[in-house]
Image: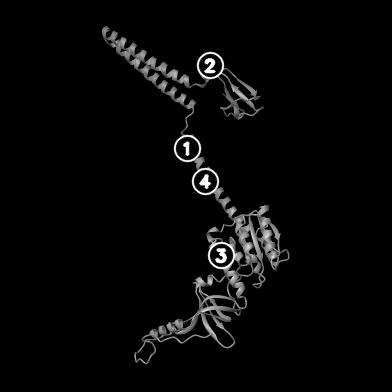
Amino acid sequence: MSFSAPRLAEGGFSGSDAVLTVSQLNRRVAQLLEDGVPRLWVAGEISNFTRAASGHWYFSIKDEAAAVRAVMFRGRAQAVGFVPEVGGRYEFRVQVSLYEPRGDYQVQVESLRQAGRGDLHEAFLRLRDRLTQEGLIDPARRRPLPVLPRAVGVVTSLSAAALRDVLSVMARRAPHVRVIVYPAQVQGRDAAPQLCAALDRAAERAEVDTLLLVRGGGSLEDLWCFNDEALARRIAACPMPVVSGVGHETDFTIADFVADLRAPTPTAAAELCCEDRGQVLGRLRAARDLLVRGQRRRLEHAAIRLDRARAQLVSPVQRLQLRRQRLEFAARRLQAGLERLLRERRQRPPAALDRLSSGLDGLLQRRHRRLDAVLAALGALDPHRVLGRGYALVRRIDGTIVKNALDLKIHEPIEIEFGQGRAQAEVTRTDALL
């Protein structure tokens, strides 16, 4: 590979005696490198790899004789699809530049692929881009997992260590959840069709709430069946949420992008698909205790209100007693008034006595009428007078009054009070009024 030397920019490094600041010098050197060296591919080994909190990757690219600092910014790093390993050999698409604050020569990495696997990586990127354009990798289409699944399906090989890891985690965290395995090869030429068939069986049988697609770690070739386009479309069309737990944390496949949730490992997939039984029971106990305390407070407040209402309630017997007391008091006042009038009548002239007698008669008549009205009102309140008109009062054995025939049970003993006397009876039939 060859490239021509850059032309010096105006005011550059000609024979000028102008004095430059260090910042100006570094800026001009950076411009010379960026303009003079085209983007190119560099092969080398990664060392000193750092993932910053900002998402940028900082590392060195080296071979047996030299090394160069490199940076890969967050947006381009996310598009790689996997996290490179220290000591791994890769091919880097780079732009040569200068880090001006320190004057360090470095390269900005735009993309990378595993050395010797450029075709596979390019195929991976093409499929990912196509599925992205179709909306299958859109985060908005990802479905939440059921919080308390009744059954969880696992698509993997029966001999895979990943299956043992999943079963172990489920037995420890959620022994109440059924686990149904849909076996399929997870490596080799026939793996992708078998994985598709397993997903189809799970969708057709519709017996699980969540589906785990898991496999342990391996090389790019070992995991390539999870980059199959048909499998990706099956995952996107699956009626239940799919959790992808393929490989290790640094492994990324197309299945990870189209699944509803990506787990870094098969064990993590099992942990994410359902909550720990102990934690769920703990929350239920806390909710039960809160409900019991709230119900107890409501009952206590209701009892207080009942006591207050009972204290304000006056029975018919008490009302009759109050009315009798008032009548007796009125009768005593009337008697005293009559005696006083008689005494005055004896002391007055006959004409005055006649007028007094006439007025007294009228007063007595009015008082008698008021007395009769009060007695009639008292009689209306007297329950025994109501019974005397042919009605009856029905009580249970404990003395409570029965207001609704439907409250009684067949063969329940009752007591009936009439206007004259009482009788014991037994319920043989109850009917509601039309």
Q: Quadrant of the N terminus?
A: bottom right
Query: Which residue matches tag 2?
Result: 389
Instruction: Point out residue 53 in the picture as x, y percentages from the top left corner.
Output: 50, 72
Q: How much space separates mark 3 and mark 2, taking CA atoms?
A: 94 Å
Give the mark nearest the N terminus, 3 or 1. Answer: 3
Give the mark nearest the N terminus, 4 or 3. Answer: 3
Which label is found at residue 423?
none
Q: Secondary structure at mark 1?
A: helix
Q: Which residue is more in the foreground, 146 or 107?
A: 107
Q: How much space separates mark 3 and mark 1, taking CA atoms?
A: 75 Å
**Badge 1 density bin: few <14, some 14–19, many ≥20, Cα 10 Å:** few
| Location of residue 352 with respect to 140 vertically, above or below | above
Give the mark nearest the N terminus, 4 or 2. Answer: 4
Give the mark nearest the N terminus, 4 or 1. Answer: 4
At x 67% / y 71%, what residue is drawn?
222
Disc nearest the viewer among 4 and 1: 4
Query: Which residue matches tag 4?
Result: 297
Q: Taking the image as drawn, is residue 56 in sight?
A: yes
Q: Quadrant of residue 185?
A: bottom right
Q: Quadrant of residue 387?
A: top right
Query: Which residue matches tag 1?
Result: 308
Instruction: Point out residue 57 in the picture as x, y percentages from the top left corner.
Output: 52, 75
Instruction: Point out residue 427 in the picture as x, y percentages from the top left corner.
Output: 65, 25
| Location of residue 53 with respect to 330 vertically, above or below | below
Q: How much space separates mark 4 and mark 2, taking CA atoms?
A: 47 Å
Residue type pointed to by label 2: Arg
Give the mark nearest the N terminus, 3 or 2. Answer: 3
Query: Which residue matches tag 3?
Result: 130
Judge from the rendering whether residue 300 lies leftward or rightward of residue 210; answer left or right: left
Quick check: marks 4 and 2 in contact, CB under 8 Å? no
Residue type pointed to by label 4: Arg
